[in-house]
Amino acid sequence: MRRGLPTFRDADQPPPCGTDACARPVDGAGRALVRCRPPRDTVSGVNSSVHIELPAEAIWAAISDVHCMGEWSPETTSCAWRGAARGPAVGARFRGHNRLRWVRWFTDCAVVACEPGREFAFDVHFGPVPDARWRYRLEPDDDGTGCTVTEDCQDRRPAVLAKLSNVVMGIPDRAEHNRAGIQMTLAQLKDRLEARHGRRASGGLG
């Protein structure tokens, strides 16, 4: 049976775990149904959350390995560390290569938050111009077997450049565009990591 994309819930609500009221529902075969938090517009931009049936440390290791970013991002095709950087650390720099329809470009990024099992964030620049800050926050379940991952994007482009780039790239609504991208990223992250660690095959969502 073909699985659909996760459904999203309000990012301000508590994680869907830990209480009877938030217990995950099951389908007719007894399998737990995915429940994810939806995105919302905030002062910082757009964010969304998803629950993944893996320990926070394993999820963080995948998120902070920038070489893997192209596996779940709908726009980023590849990333590589730059300079002396060989792994995630505050101040480490990497370059991301991106594609949206016929437009290809690269951005330079710098890690600004790096706490294993808890947080990973980086600033993005297009040349000398600030573009965005992307942040992943991880909230482990009480029993440590699962984790809620929140992805946030803060648009930092100057207003004039933002309008120009949106026209060039055919994006009438940047918030809506980022919203869809975050949803797809989190859905892909969940699917790939749980499949890689055998959670679905072993019934780990039950």
Image (cartoon, grey):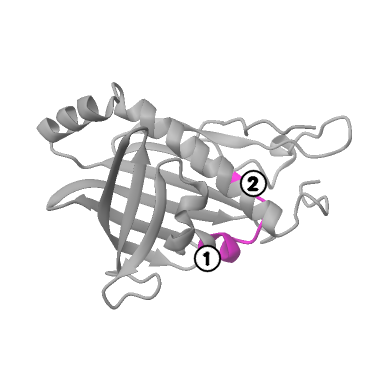
Looking at the picture, how far across and down is residue 109, in whole percent? 27, 58
Q: In this view of the protein, which residue sits in the foreground, 12 or 94?
A: 94
Up-down: is 172 above or below 197?
A: above
In percent of width and height, residue 78 lies at: 41, 55
Q: Please tell me whether residue 93 is drawn above or below residue 26 in the rendered image.
A: below
The disc placed on residue 61 is 1
Which residue is drawn at the image coordinates 89% and 35% (left, top)? 29
Point out residue 93 in the picture as x, y percentages from the top left corner.
28, 66
In which quadrant of the rendered view does residue 56 lie? bottom right
Name the amino acid, label 2: Asp
Which comes before the other along the chain, label 2 or label 1?
1
Residue 154 is one of the magenta-drawn residues: no
Relative to 39, 104 lies left or right: left
Relative image position of residue 43 (x, y in whole percent): 28, 35
Give the residue at x 36% y 57%. Answer: 121
Give me the C-alpha separation between circle 2 and circle 1: 16 Å
Is 54 magenta? The answer is yes
Q: Quadrant of residue 199?
A: bottom right
* Extreme-bottom residue of the structure: 84
Query: Few, some or many C-alpha atoms within 10 Å of disc 2 (few <14, some 14-19, many ≥20)?
Result: some
Outermost residue, front direction?
102
For the residue pair 121 and 104, the one nearer the viewer reads as 104
Tag 1, which secondary structure?
A: helix
Q: Amino acid at mark 1?
A: Ala
The magenta segment is: 51-61
Q: Which residue is mark 2?
A: 191
